[in-house]
Image (tube, rainbow, N blue to C red):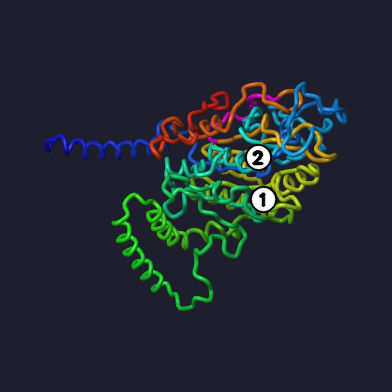
Amino acid sequence: MDRRKFLWSYGGGLGGIALSHLMAQAQGGLHHKAKAKRVVQFFLSGAASQCDSFDYKPLLVEKAGQKWDPGEKVELFQSNPGVVMPSPWEWKRHGQSGKWVSGLFPHTAGCVDDMAFLMSMLSKSNVHGPATFMQATGFVLPGFPSMGAWISYALGSLNENLPSFVVLPDARGVPPNGPANWGAGFLPASHQATAIRVGSADPIQDLFPPASAKYITAESEREGLELLQKVNRAHLEDRQGDTRLDARIASYEMAARLQLSAPAVMDLTGETAATQKLYGLDQERTSEMGRRCLVARRLLEKGVRFVQIWSGADNGFPRRNWDSHENLAKDHGDMAGALDQPMAALVKDLKARGLLEDTIVYWTTEFGRMPCSQGSKGRDHNPFGFCSWIAGGGVKGGVTYGATDDWSYKAVEKPIYCYDLHATVLHLLGIDHTRLTYRHNGIDRRLTDVHGSVIREVLA
């Protein structure tokens, strides 16, 4: 290679990368003009019931108490099919769209005209761990990057003083698979989520030195970090390609910035009394989730790309998640009672502040529940048909896509998987899901694997 070719290959190549980056910044997306800049995801861990929330089926009322016979053999996760079980909650139409919503979500019902309901979701597993992985990462197996990590990798942060990806776990614990649900997998480790335990005395672990460490001063901490940085860089020189150290260095640098920025974001005292009441901070039942939803809004305002809010924890009995095998009315009632008002408040607050226009609100669960009873009061797992919804950021509000059969058992009209929903969210962020790839073990991996189509019927 002569000098001219060398300079063009390397200089021109780097220039192309820089130009691509500048174009992405200009249009707000990686591959095309973006409609949205950021995402907030609600993940209802344990499997929220579609036939008790947004999938109204009069046949369940008409055939209540009768033997359930969908016309085929049904193999359930841990029981035999019981009788037809109608929802314990009344159903009403809401909004100009006339969307049916049960009394389980009375506050969310007020937002239906901003939402696109995806009523024909499918899962490849009826086991919580793999199904949760599938919705979070696009794969039922462990080791793959979460959706938030992919978005962080593609678009980076809007604020260098805050992480690009933040997770707000349920105060009672973590879901099945734990932090792997928001991990970076084989992507550079810096794209994994920063977990914030809202309401805790130590919301970001190890961000500040313990109170007992009186010997640590601002000056000694600065000098220590400078020395650590020198040692880390020297260590990295002998270990090129190991992203863990890069991520660790980045995390130290981020931690230094977070010490200044995070306390301000977490401090809710500046919020008006009306806003705090909107989120339910004045009620014991809603205060914990309300705090997390309000912090989520503040994080989004400050430039965090992806905020994930979990409802439910994998901590056995009594039920503290949506896995209502024994008593659906009690368990779902408790969970929705804590979630409904704060979740609706976040949608309404984002809209009032003009943020919903470029923020995607994304609601999902790992699979649905059966239309028949388990025991006398519960419902078993149903991977054959359930629902999700999205709102804001280029989404057409007040629409419904797909449908289940008359039992709310199987998706029969326009069935879709998480791949299609993930492709749609990426599209709204200006990302072509087929072109967002990362070479790993000889394979160009992507969030949507080899699947997925943008659901254009729900785009504004």
Amino acid, disc 2:
Val
Q: Secondary structure at mark 1?
A: loop
Amino acid, disc 1:
Asp
Question: Quarter-wise, where is residue 21 in the image?
Answer: top left
Residue 459 in picture, x, y percent from top left: 54, 27
Residue marked by disc 2 = 127
Q: The N terminus appears in which quarter of the rendering? A: top left
Could you give the CA–CA distance between mark 2 and mark 1, rounded to whole angstroms?
A: 13 Å
Residue displayed at 74% across by 56% down: 284
Residue 335 in picture, x, y percent from top left: 73, 47
Q: Secondary structure at mark 2?
A: loop
Residue marked by disc 1 = 314
Question: Quarter-wise, where is residue 327 in the image?
Answer: top right
Q: Earlier in the sequence, mark 2 or mark 1?
A: 2
Mark 2 and mark 1 residues within 8 Å of each other at the beta carbon:
no
Q: Residue furthest left?
A: 2
Magenta segment: does it hold 216?
no
Q: Residue furthest right?
A: 65
* Stretch of the chain drawn in magenta: 393-404
